[in-house]
Image: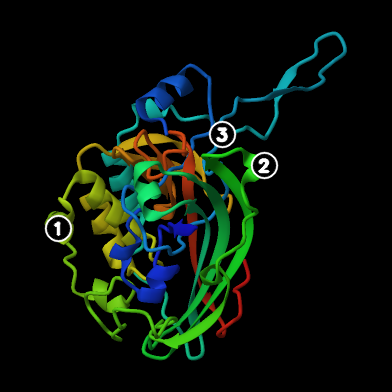
Amino acid sequence: MTERGDHNPDRQLDEALASLHLEARMSNRSLDDARAKLMREASAKGAPAAKSPFRRRGLVVGVAAAAAAAVVGGVAALGGGGGAPAQPVAQPTTAQQPTKRDVSLLSASKVLNDAADKITANDPELKSGQYRYVEVKGSYSRGFQIGTPQEVVSAPAGYTYLADVTYQTWIPADVTQEWLEKRVPGSAKLIGSSMPAAEVPAYQPADTDKGERRGACGDFFPNSQPKKVCGDATDSGQPAFYANLPRDPDQLLAWLKNYTSQRGSSPSTMFHFGIQFLNSGIMPADLRSPLLRAMSKIDGVKVVEEATTPDGRKGLALGLDSDQERRDLIVDPDKGEIIGERTVAKAQADYPWIKPGTVTSSVSVTTKIAPAIGVVPAS
């Protein structure tokens, strides 16, 4: 039996932080126009999350369970207040639920540019002894195929779980010093199989989805290949990768097209990597705004729906389809924060037993300052 796993974004905190090459995480993040129409008709549905058309190296990158999106809606509520007995007077309550947005009227380009306007261009400086803390709560597809290599090709059979994993990473100000990463597995849900559910083996977390690891420069897997080089400017898991990137949106878009040229530079590929970089947890603040503006220029990006991340934050999901999946970036348009990502399976999903519309990964990312290595910052 062969295990195949995906992680997103991931992110670099999964195996991407292990091998620290985001490209390797390509797999990796619903219901586009149809969803918008259904929402307008007040028939709101939870949006499924999917897998990316890019196969990741079995690294983990995301949180949440099979329902990584929720429609947020509300109506104004009025409470009755008492006046004179003969003439009761209605008084409005002080609390009012937020009004649901009609996402069909929203432009993805405007949402991304408005979010970019709100981003603070400065990162907090770490004091002596402090660490950058990056927490990734995610749900990731863990696929298993059954049979000989020939059978896998001719008649694919197997099953897929959506497994929860939380990644906690402590990064020192001097990134050449020791980093700490903890991976904590959670529950798992069967999201598809080629056999009766009763015959599917119980899920067991892989060794790479659990445990504590330390390493200078984030080299948590020193025996992995290619060998990690500290300060490598071609390694998207290291701050050096982002230091020399252009800050002009048009130049960034050209760079992103060139970076993905060996994968065709398609809009979906460019959007995929843009999401991965934004959710790396180590991208500097002054690069996030121009990258959002660059991504606003990618053809085909749409506002999908209002969504809730695995850690409960609410925002807008902006997605782009490929034949295999839809990749979603989730932003808080009011604060200008990138709060997560997800993937939703399409008609040509990697595994034939995965139904279109199934959420195949969902991730939320939080960064804070920790007072010491191994200490989780207060909320």
Query: If the image is split into quadrants, where does the C terminus sit?
Result: bottom right
Quadrant hosting residue 109? top left
Nearer to the camera, 335 or 166 = 166
**Which amino acid is tagged 1?**
Gln
Question: Residue extending furthest top?
Answer: 86
Q: Earlier in the sequence, mark 2 or mark 3?
A: 3
| Residue beneath disc 2 | 198
Q: Secondary structure at mark 3?
A: loop
Residue named by callout 1: 262
Left or right of 278? Residue 192 is: right
Mark nearest the camera among 2 and 3 is 2
Residue highlighted by disc 3:
98
Residue lying at 50% horizontally and 85% vertically, measured from the top left: 214
- Kindly tell me whether residue 297 is visible in this rendering: no
Q: Secondary structure at mark 1?
A: helix
Q: Residue at x 20, y 39 (%)?
A: 299
Percent x, y for residue 266? Answer: 18, 46
| Mark 2 to mark 3 CA distance (whole Å) | 43 Å
Instruction: Name the residue type under label 2.
Output: Ala
Viewer-proximal residue among 256 and 325: 325
Instruction: Please identify, in this view, whether the residue under mark 1 or under mark 2 is nearer the observer.
Output: 2
- Residue 356, given in percent of the width and then of the height, sits at 43, 33
Residue 173 higher or lower than 269, as above or below:
below
Q: Secondary structure at mark 2?
A: helix
* Residue 80 seen in render: yes
Q: Distance from label 3 to label 1 (Cα)?
A: 45 Å
